């Protein structure tokens, strides 16, 4: 099991992760990774498999929990090697380690990248293509010196090594090497370079390749064996045009491509190594460079696939503007290469064939778009099904709606309307706002005092008036001494024998009693 190290945004190691999914590729294209693990790494973090070439910088965080970003190689490809002011080209020479460190500092990555000075590879005088990305430029520089670039994470930095390129072929057990090969027996062997100038004044050079792929300005293949192409190198003067056209024809001598899968994880090849694939049935033997590594991991188990060479001898990417009129080669048939597209003219009709690398890019984009659209379609379909189910459930659970007076209900499809009637003197209903205001005002009502001009009022005369809850009014007039006034027929008892008339007024008669004195008011 291979653990993955995750750092914080300041590149301080946080944790080692064993349960993760990684898809990483670098070399001729991509130079990026996609990682899914928990917790989700933050933007600016590094993801590292220590002691290997596999790692990179997190620059994208996705809502599905995954993160993406450039690999170490992708970081280099995001920087441009520019010539010094007043110079046509950036030119280097010396020990490979010293050259690499100078380049890392030049592009501002020396804090993360370093190269050992103890390299056996020495760089002769080398001029980079103008404004090339650093990864492509460094690989081409090392390839020109039969070397390759290896990037290894160790001791907290990306260590760059310039190593002699290796060849893998007969040394690989055939049981461990699966490959698909294509052989083009007729690559371009006559390349016409077009440089500065217009029409008849334009610079034109011719370079030829023989049956063995050797390039010169002497033509040996003619007739059906000849295959022509145009290399448009605008604004190039004759000397530069000669150099670049010859270089491009050498590139076009690739006779096919190999797709390699290594089933033995103990064998590791680098970008820039070469591998030989053989098919004895078809008699195909191809030796091509390792162009791309695809690394995948699930649950800490790594698998590595290698892509080598190109899908056909036509695969190339030449930039520039095409010659405005005319055709190339005999019989009005020829080929023009521009930016990864093969444009063929036959019988005054142009047809365009996208090179396999372009097809792969378009196919990948189309597959990604189709997958995304399919996912969205599935989500929309699920939402529609959920909506239909919800409506059905609502219709089933709310089949009928009943109300009581003063409410009434009516249903129109999925909508239910509820109305209420207002109370009147003849029927029940809800209270109106006007009635509510009247009720709110009752708490502040005061019974007016009765006068000749005010009807319905009362005027107490010193008597006590009690209003019971049932509306019965009881009045008690006070005596002359402000005591209680007993009506005729009332009976009182005392122990003093004193006549109650002295206290309450009126006429009282004493009645027989076995105990206290009992008095009855008689008048």
Image: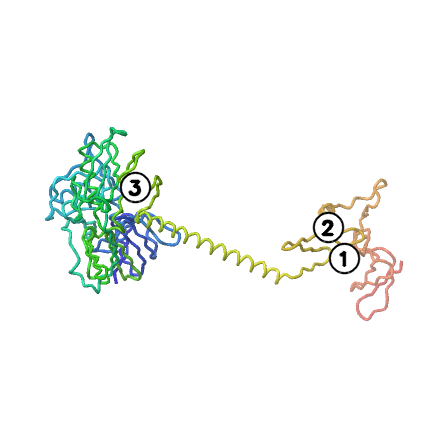
Pick the residue in front: 62 or 8: 62
Quadrant position of residue 21? bottom left
Quarter of the figure with the C terminus? bottom right
Residue 422 position, x and y percent, is 74, 50
Relative to 427, does residue 198 appear above or below in the rendering?
A: above
Q: Measuring 30% from the left and 44% from the top, which residue is drawn there?
A: 340
Residue highlighted by disc 2 = 431
Residue highlighted by disc 3 = 333
The dot on residue 469 is: 1
Relative to 410, does residue 226 appear above or below in the rendering?
A: above
Pick the residue in front: 52 or 499: 52
Q: Measuring 78% from the left and 64% from the top, which residue is drawn there?
A: 495
Q: Are discs 2 and 3 less than 8 Å apart at CB?
A: no
- Label 3 sits on a secondary structure element that is loop
Question: In this rendering, would 88 be left or right of 416?
Answer: left
Residue 228 position, x and y percent, is 25, 42
How busy is the neighbourhood of tag 1: few (under 14 within 10 Å), some, or many (20 plus)?
few
Residue at far right of view: 523
């Amino acid at each position: 099991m291979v653990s993955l190290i995750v750092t914080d945004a300041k590149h301080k190691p946080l944790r080692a992760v064993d349960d993760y999914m990684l898809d990483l590729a670098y070399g001729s294209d991509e130079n990026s990774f996609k990682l899914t693990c928990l917790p989700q790494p933050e933007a600016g973090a590094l993801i590292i498999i220590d002691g290997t070439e596999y790692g990179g910088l997190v620059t994208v965080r996705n809502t599905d929990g995954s993160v993406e970003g450039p690999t170490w190689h992708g970081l280099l490809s995001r920087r441009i090697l520019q010539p010094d002011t007043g110079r046509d080209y950036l030119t280097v020479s010396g020990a490979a380690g010293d050259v690499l460190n100078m380049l890392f500092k030049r592009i501002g990555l020396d804090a993360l990248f370093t190269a050992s000075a103890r390299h056996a590879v020495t760089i002769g005088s080398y001029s980079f293509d103008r404004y090339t990305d650093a990864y492509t430029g460094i690989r081409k520089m090392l390839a020109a010196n039969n070397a390759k670039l290896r990037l290894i994470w160790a001791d907290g930095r990306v260590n760059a090594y310039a190593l002699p390129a290796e060849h893998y072929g007969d040394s690989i057990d055939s049981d461990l090497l699966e490959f698909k090969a294509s052989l083009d027996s007729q690559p371009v062997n006559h390349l016409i370079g077009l440089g500065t100038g217009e029409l008849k004044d334009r610079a034109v050079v011719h370079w030829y390749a023989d049956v063995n792929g050797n390039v010169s300005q002497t033509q040996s293949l003619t007739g059906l064996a000849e295959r022509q192409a145009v290399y448009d190198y605008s604004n190039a003067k004759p000397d530069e045009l000669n150099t670049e056209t010859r270089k491009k024809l050498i590139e076009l001598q690739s006779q096919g491509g190999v797709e390699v899968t290594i089933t033995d994880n103990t064998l590791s090849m680098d970008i820039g190594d070469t591998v030989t694939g053989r098919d004895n049935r078809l008699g195909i033997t191809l030796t091509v460079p390792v162009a791309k590594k695809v690394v995948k991991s699930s649950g800490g188990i790594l698998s590595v696939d290698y892509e080598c060479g190109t899908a056909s001898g036509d695969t190339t990417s030449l930039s520039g503007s095409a010659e405005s009129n005319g055709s190339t080669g005999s019989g009005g048939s020829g080929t023009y290469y521009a930016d990864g597209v093969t444009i063929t003219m036959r019988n005054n009709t142009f047809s365009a064939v996208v090179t396999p690398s372009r097809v792969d890019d378009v196919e990948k984009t189309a597959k990604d778009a189709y997958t995304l659209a399919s996912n969205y379609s599935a989500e929309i379909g699920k939402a529609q099904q959920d909506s239909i189910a919800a409506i059905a459930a609502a219709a089933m659970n709310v089949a009928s709606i009943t109300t009581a007076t003063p409410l009434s209900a009516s249903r129109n499809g999925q909508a239910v309307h509820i109305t209420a009637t207002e109370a009147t003197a003849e029927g029940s209903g809800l209270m109106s706002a006007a009635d509510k205001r009247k009720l709110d005002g009752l708490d502040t009502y005061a019974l007016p005092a009765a006068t000749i001009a005010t009807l319905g009022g009362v005027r107490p005369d010193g008597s006590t008036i009690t209003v019971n809850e049932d509306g019965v009014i009881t009045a008690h007039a006070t005596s002359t001494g402000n005591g209680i006034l007993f009506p005729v027929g009332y009976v009182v008892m005392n122990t003093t024998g004193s006549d109650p008339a002295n206290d309450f007024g009126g006429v009282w008669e004493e009645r027989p009693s076995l105990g206290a004195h009992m008095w009855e008011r008689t008048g």
